[in-house]
Image (spheres, coloured by chain):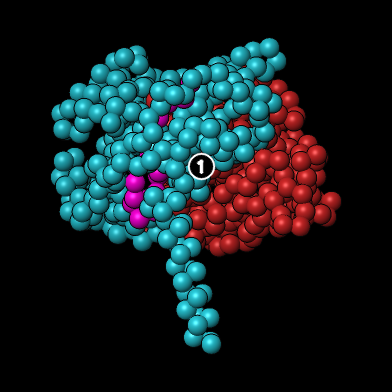
Chain colours: A red, B cyan
């Protein structure tokens, strides 16, 4: 009797353990794609350019901008939450960084700030550098369309390592000109990364916007809202509409620095799962 | 001998500093953010008579916002935000996190923004069913209810908030950002002076931002001649939003306006006047309009 009772208790315990295990497994499967992490160290990296000119060499035709100051300010605002992997400024910033997995894709958060060209390549945008990736630390006005000073949409792949979030604080990185091929080229940059914050129009560089964007991120705002709100504060009304835009892996829309989707596996890169990607939100600032 | 040289050097430096300030009439250069895309070198042609433009203008100065903690408490009370007040050193402000609401107060400018519904504001799933006109009406009523709508903020536009796009076939309107822009001294204020009300779904207000600094009249300043401002524009010492393909353009209108810088009062103490050039250029047979902004006070340039 006692033996049978013990056996029954043991069986019940086994069944209970199995049930608990099953429920745990179901939860694990459901929650697998969503990682809530407070302990992981997050790494950031930057390319930013103020000086598109030099005392000793010819100047870029498009003039100096506040890109290096922007990424400096952004880093200063987020440094309590991110460790710095790299910060290349001015002539140290190089378009080859965008094509090198061991640089751009080695961090969790990457930001570029400087010029971004919409015109030279009809179906692509290009982050524009002063240094040529062929080795020279400058380019002149006759070299604006050189491949060595432009990181083009079709040669940039975000993800592949740990990179999840990208900010391009410049004009037009997310402008599609109403062309679905150009939009598709933008989506194709997602090879594991989840969100790109940028502009789909002309915008105006104010390095102080980096501080506010960073502060909002640290305060716990989502990447999307932090970017939009900083734009609301700093993008001026000056006769035209500024379009702040976030696009990428749609389920990552709520992501913030303490709760986020991990880097996407190959089968969920845009080219393998296009329906998972979208223009997540547009935030228009109309002029007066 | 040494003493004489030091005295002469000090005199030269002092004279230099005085000339610098007299030239600028005591006003600092104006920070105008520049576009992050190519700005072409353009030949501008003036097609209008500018003789009716004034030679001087009233400059305003920003009013110090007072005790920031008192300001934070005041806004918290208005919107019923109860929570710990956290001081922020990087942006110099205070953050109050309430239940589903929060307040960000900026100590150096007296600006603030309030989120009234964190869930709705983040990524709403509900489609917006109201029109722009209704969103503007709701926003006006909201600001009036809280006594936040000043009469000078009388230019109102509603900007769409959307998910997806018509190009990708998944466009969804989720709301509007209603922007209220002011006029001062009868002139438009460009830059970042605005009140924003975010409206979602069927008309729920989820966020309100007071993004302007208060001003008071300061002094009459002498304006630079229009030809000097045009010369600065030609040399790209201006904020200009002309298409990058442009090579020549005609200026069809010049007006005076004010520019509010986004920074602290310490960085730019004055609401300074700017010349606003409006013109056209032809790109691929199409007429494109553009605006350009040049600091208007004599001696003041783009910083």
Q: Is residue A132 left or right of residue B205?
A: right
**B264 relative position to A168: left or right:** left
- Using residue B171 as the reference point, say whether residue A88 is left or right of it: right
Task: Decide if residue A143 is in sight here.
Answer: yes
Residue B261 magenta: yes
Q: Residue furthest right?
A: A134
Q: Residues within 10 Å of mark 1 (few under 14, many from 20)?
A: many
Which percent across, then down, holds residue A272? 70, 31
Q: Does B226 lie within the magenta span?
A: no
Residue at image x 60%, y 38%?
B236
Residue at image position (45%, 38%) is B224
| Boundaries of the magenta span | B253-271
- Give how far across and how far down residue A131 sits, in percent: 75, 51
The percent position of residue B244, horizontal first and vertical second, equals 66, 29
Residue placed most toward the observer, B245 or A117: B245
Secondary structure, mark 1, is loop
* Residue B210: x %, y % from top left: 29, 39
Toward the top, the furthest residue is B285
Observer-nearest of B290 and B160:
B290
Quarter of the image for residue B212 reads top left
Q: Chain of mark 1?
A: B
Kindly identify the residue that appears in the image at 63 percent across and 47 percent down. Answer: A64
- Residue situated in front as seen by the camera: A193 or A251: A193
Q: In the picture shown, does residue A95 fall above or below B173?
A: below
Q: Quadrant of the C terminus of chain A?
A: top left
Can you say whether B1 is above or below B163 in the image?
below
Q: Is residue A37 left or right of residue B111?
A: right
Residue named by callout 1: B33
Q: Is residue A269 visible?
A: no
Q: Residue at x 38, y 53 (%)?
A: B26
Q: How many marks?
A: 1
């Amino acid at each position: 009797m006692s033996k049978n009772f013990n056996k029954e208790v043991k069986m019940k315990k086994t069944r209970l353990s199995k049930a608990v295990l099953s429920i745990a497994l179901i939860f694990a499967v459901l929650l697998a794609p969503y990682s809530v992490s407070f302990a992981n160290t997050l790494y950031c990296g930057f390319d930013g350019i103020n000086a598109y000119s030099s005392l000793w060499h010819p100047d870029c035709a498009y003039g100096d901008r506040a890109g290096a100051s922007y990424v400096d300010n952004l880093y200063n605002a987020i440094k309590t939450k991110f460790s710095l992997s790299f910060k290349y400024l001015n002539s140290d910033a190089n378009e080859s960084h965008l094509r090198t997995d061991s640089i751009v894709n080695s961090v969790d958060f990457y930001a570029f700030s400087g010029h971004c060209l919409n015109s030279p390549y009809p179906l692509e945008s290009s982050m524009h550098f002063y240094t040529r990736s062929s080795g020279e630390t400058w380019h002149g006005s006759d070299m604006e369309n050189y491949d060595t000073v432009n990181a083009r949409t079709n040669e940039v792949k975000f993800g592949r390592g740990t990179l999840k979030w990208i900010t391009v604080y410049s004009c037009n990185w997310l402008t599609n000109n109403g062309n679905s091929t150009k939009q598709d080229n933008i989506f194709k940059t997602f090879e594991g990364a989840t969100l790109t914050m940028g502009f789909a129009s002309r915008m105006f560089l104010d390095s102080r916007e980096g501080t506010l964007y960073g502060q909002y991120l640290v305060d716990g705002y989502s990447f999307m809202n932090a970017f939009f709100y900083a734009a609301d504060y700093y993008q001026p009304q000056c006769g035209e509409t500024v379009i702040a835009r976030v696009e990428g892996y749609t389920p990552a829309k709520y992501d913030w620095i303490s709760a986020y989707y991990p880097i996407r596996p190959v089968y969920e890169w845009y080219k393998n799962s296009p329906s998972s990607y979208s223009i997540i939100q547009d935030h228009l600032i109309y002029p007066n | 001998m040494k003493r004489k040289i030091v005295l002469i050097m000090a005199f030269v430096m002092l004279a230099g500093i005085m000339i610098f300030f007299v030239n600028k009439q005591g006003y600092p250069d104006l920070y105008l953010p520049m576009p992050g895309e190519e700005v072409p070198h353009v030949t501008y042609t003036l097609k209008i008579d500018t003789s009716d433009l004034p030679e001087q203008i009233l400059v305003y100065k920003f009013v110090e916002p007072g005790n920031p903690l008192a300001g934070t408490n005041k806004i918290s009370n208005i919107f019923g935000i109860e929570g710990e007040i956290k001081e922020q050193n990087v942006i110099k402000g205070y953050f109050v996190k309430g239940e589903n609401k929060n307040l960000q107060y900026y100590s150096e400018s007296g600006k603030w923004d309030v989120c009234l519904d964190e869930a709705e504001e983040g990524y709403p799933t509900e489609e917006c069913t109201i029109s722009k006109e209704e969103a503007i009406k709701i926003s006006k009523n909201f600001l009036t209810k809280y006594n936040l709508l000043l009469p000078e903020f009388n230019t109102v536009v509603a900007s769409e908030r959307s998910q997806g796009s018509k190009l990708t076939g998944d466009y969804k309107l989720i709301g509007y950002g209603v922007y209220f822009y002011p006029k001062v001294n009868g002139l438009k204020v460009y830059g970042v002076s605005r009140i924003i009300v975010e409206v979602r779904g069927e008309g729920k207000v989820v966020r309100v931002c007071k993004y302007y600094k208060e001003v008071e009249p300061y002094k009459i300043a002498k304006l630079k001649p229009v030809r000097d401002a045009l010369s600065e524009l030609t040399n790209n010492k201006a904020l200009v939003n002309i298409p990058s393909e442009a090579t020549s353009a005609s200026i069809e209108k010049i007006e005076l306006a004010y520019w509010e810088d986004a920074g602290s009062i310490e960085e730019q103490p004055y609401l300074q006047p700017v010349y606003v050039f409006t013109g056209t250029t032809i790109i691929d047979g199409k007429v494109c309009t553009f605006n350009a902004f040049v600091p208007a006070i004599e001696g003041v340039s783009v910083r």
